[in-house]
């Protein structure tokens, strides 16, 4: 039967040979390597803009460039860079703080000019005022740059009959007449120093303030 059909034997042999060739090709073929990623072409996306008439006018297309890893970055003409935020440093408590340079005053205000020095005196009533007596205080200040002699002249009405001074050493009190008294320093008053004189006056009527008060010929402050 096989001899009567030789084409069957030939077909079987051809099939077996084909199978052997395919198996040999697969055995000698190495493993496939994945192809490297190649960036694709840039994609242009038009961005519409509005004209003065209110109609939408297509503007220059925005260029989209593919970046490695599949992300896309946009770069449009006329775009400006964002401002860099201030640097931050971590505080001990774990919170971020903005570092700032300490502000400093640009200039120091000038000192006021010193007034010209003079010798002055002031009179004021101090303590309780009684019907037959009162207390007062005279302060002499030497605002000059050198030691000065001083003399204060007080003139009251005739109702003031007597005076008693309490000031410590360096002051003398003299009576020139009814209600007329002179206070003077026995030693010059040093520059920038002051002399305080406490007085107790006796009287028979009213009036605690002198009608006349001068120091070295200048009017006192009353």
Image (cartoon, grey):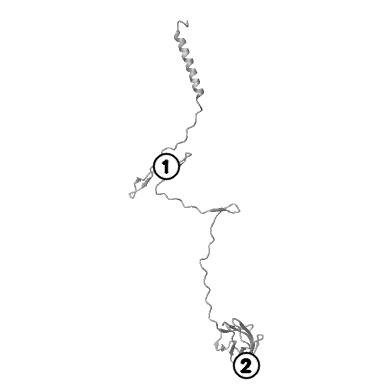
Depth order, front residue of 219/201: 219
Tell me if residue 221 comes above or below residue 158 in the rendering.
Answer: above
Q: Is residue 202 left or right of residue 60?
A: right
Q: How many numbered marks are there?
A: 2
- The part of the image, by quadrant, that contains residue 181 is bottom right
Residue 64 or 127: which is nearer the viewer? 64
User: Which residue is label 1 attached to?
Assistant: 64
Q: Which residue is mark 2?
A: 175
Residue visible at 54% across and 53% down? 88
Q: Label 1 neighbourhood size at 10 Å, few (<14), some (14-19), many (20+)?
A: some
- Residue 188 quadrant: bottom right
* Disc 2 + disc 1, Cβ < 8 Å: no
Residue 128 at x, y percent in the picture: 64, 83
The quadrant in which residue 62 appears is top left
Measured along the vertical axis of the image, is residue 87 above or below residue 125?
above
Measuring 54% from the left and 87% from the top, which residue is drawn there? 218
Q: Position of residue 8 (x, y in %)?
A: 46, 10
């Amino acid at each position: 039967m096989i001899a009567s059909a030789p084409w069957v034997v030939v077909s079987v042999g051809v099939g077996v040979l084909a199978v052997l060739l395919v198996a040999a090709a697969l055995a000698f073929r190495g493993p496939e390597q994945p192809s490297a990623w190649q960036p694709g072409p840039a994609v242009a996306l038009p961005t519409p803009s509005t004209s003065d008439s209110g109609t939408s006018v297509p503007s220059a297309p925005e260029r989209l460039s593919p970046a490695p890893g599949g992300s896309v970055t946009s770069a449009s003409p006329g775009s400006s860079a964002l401002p860099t935020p201030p640097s931050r440093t971590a505080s001990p408590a774990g919170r971020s703080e903005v570092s700032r340079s300490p502000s400093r005053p640009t200039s120091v205000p000038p000192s006021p000019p010193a007034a010209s020095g003079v010798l002055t005196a002031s009179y004021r009533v101090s303590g309780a005022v009684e019907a037959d007596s009162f207390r007062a205080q005279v302060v002499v200040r030497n605002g000059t740059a050198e030691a000065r002699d001083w003399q204060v002249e007080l003139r009251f009405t005739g109702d003031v009959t007597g005076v008693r001074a309490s000031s410590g050493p360096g002051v003398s009190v003299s009576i020139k007449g009814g209600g007329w008294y002179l206070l003077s320093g026995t030693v010059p008053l040093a520059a920038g120093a002051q002399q305080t004189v406490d007085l107790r006056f006796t009287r028979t009527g009213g009036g605690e303030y002198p009608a006349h008060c001068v120091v070295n010929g200048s009017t006192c402050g009353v």
